């Protein structure tokens, strides 16, 4: 058991002991611990910083997220940033597509059998999606003014929020993005995926058009999947 705990701590797991040890430290000292060599101490420091709810700490946490490798410390950073809500969204969207290399870079036959909405592969998009509807205004700004990497990740986050929070306010913003980038296959594919969370007649008509008129097999399969999810979700909500 001791060996297991040691392994967990090496991955950033922390407990009440680590928290108690820094309870009485001032914020400057806690910030120093964010850079400690021990990942469990870093995680505990993130937890304490998050409790302060000081918005000036958001850029620090985002910077740490860019380089952190330990699982539980990354989870602590994610939870901390989510706790800031909409205030963290501009800092997170600025990092879309810039951490790791797990993001989609072309359409693919993936997740077609997945019943839930696919989780964004970009860590900052995942965090922003968990903020929920409070992040939508910032995400729509990214669709209008962001670079292509940011836009593709923003689409994932918007779709995830619409699906899980039943907030479809960004439907028009997605259609505007389609009109702005009509030949970008990655954007097109991601929006078709996102549309499974938007059960309007406008979206259904668009997806049906993709099924009957599109030539790309991946886009057709994704359109069919979105239509199927809309139908399934309608039947379960009745």
Image: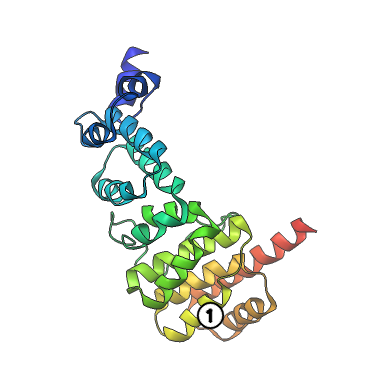
Q: Judging from the image, what secondary structure is the residue with disc 1 in?
A: helix
Left or right, 85 with respect to 230, comes to left
Q: Is residue 158 above or below residue 187?
A: above
Residue drawn at point x = 30 percent, y = 28 percent = 40
Colour mapping: rainbow
Identify which residue is drawn at 49% across, 53% down.
Answer: 131
Quarter holding the N terminus is top left
Image position, residue 218 (x, y; %) = 48, 72
Quarter of the image holding residue 172?
Answer: bottom right
Report whether 220 appears left or right of 107.
right
Front residue (pair 16, 160): 16
Measuring from the top left, give residue 188's x and y in whole percent: 46, 76
In the picture, the quarter occupied by the C terminus is: bottom right
Count of number-bearing discs: 1
Picture coordinates of residue 19, whole percent (x, y):
36, 24
**Extreme top residue here?**
2
Tell which residue pokes out farthest to the left in this image. 37
For image coordinates 29% across by 37% down, the residue present is 70
Of residues 121 and 28, the one drawn nearer to the viewer in this rendering: 28
Check the image and name the residue furthest to the right: 238
Vertical position of residue 48 compared to residue 156: above or below? above
Q: Is residue 85 above or below residue 41?
A: below
| Residue 121 seen from this side | no
Within 10 Å of disc 1 (Cα), the crowding (few <14, some 14-19, many 20+) is some
One can see residue 3 in this view: yes
* Residue on which the image places disc 1: 175
Asked whether 66 or 208 is in front, the reply is 66
Pick the residue in front: 187 or 150: 150
Tell me residue 16's x, y (percent): 40, 20
């Amino acid at each position: 058991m001791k060996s297991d705990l040691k392994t967990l701590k090496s991955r950033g797991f922390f407990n009440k002991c680590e928290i108690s040890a820094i309870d009485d430290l001032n914020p400057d000292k806690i910030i120093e611990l964010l850079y400690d060599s021990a990942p469990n101490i870093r995680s505990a420091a993130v937890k304490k910083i998050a409790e302060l709810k000081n918005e000036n700490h958001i850029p620090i946490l985002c910077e740490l997220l860019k380089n952190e490798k330990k699982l539980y410390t990354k989870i602590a950073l994610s939870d901390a940033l989510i706790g800031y809500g909409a205030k963290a969204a501009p800092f997170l969207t600025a990092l879309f597509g810039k951490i790791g290399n797990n993001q989609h870079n072309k359409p693919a036959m993936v997740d077609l059998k997945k019943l839930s909405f696919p989780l964004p592969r970009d860590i900052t998009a995942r965090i922003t999606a968990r903020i929920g509807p409070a992040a939508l205004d910032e995400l729509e700004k990214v669709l209008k003014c962001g670079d292509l990497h940011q836009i593709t990740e923003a689409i994932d986050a918007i779709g995830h929020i619409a699906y899980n929070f039943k907030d479809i306010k960004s439907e028009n913003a997605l259609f505007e993005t389609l009109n702005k980038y009509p030949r970008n296959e990655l954007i097109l594919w991601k929006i078709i995926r996102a549309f499974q969370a938007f059960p309007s007649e406008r979206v259904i008509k668009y997806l049906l058009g993709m099924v009957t008129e599109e030539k790309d097999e991946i886009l057709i399969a994704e359109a069919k999947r979105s239509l199927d999810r809309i139908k399934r979700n309608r039947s379960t909500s009745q």
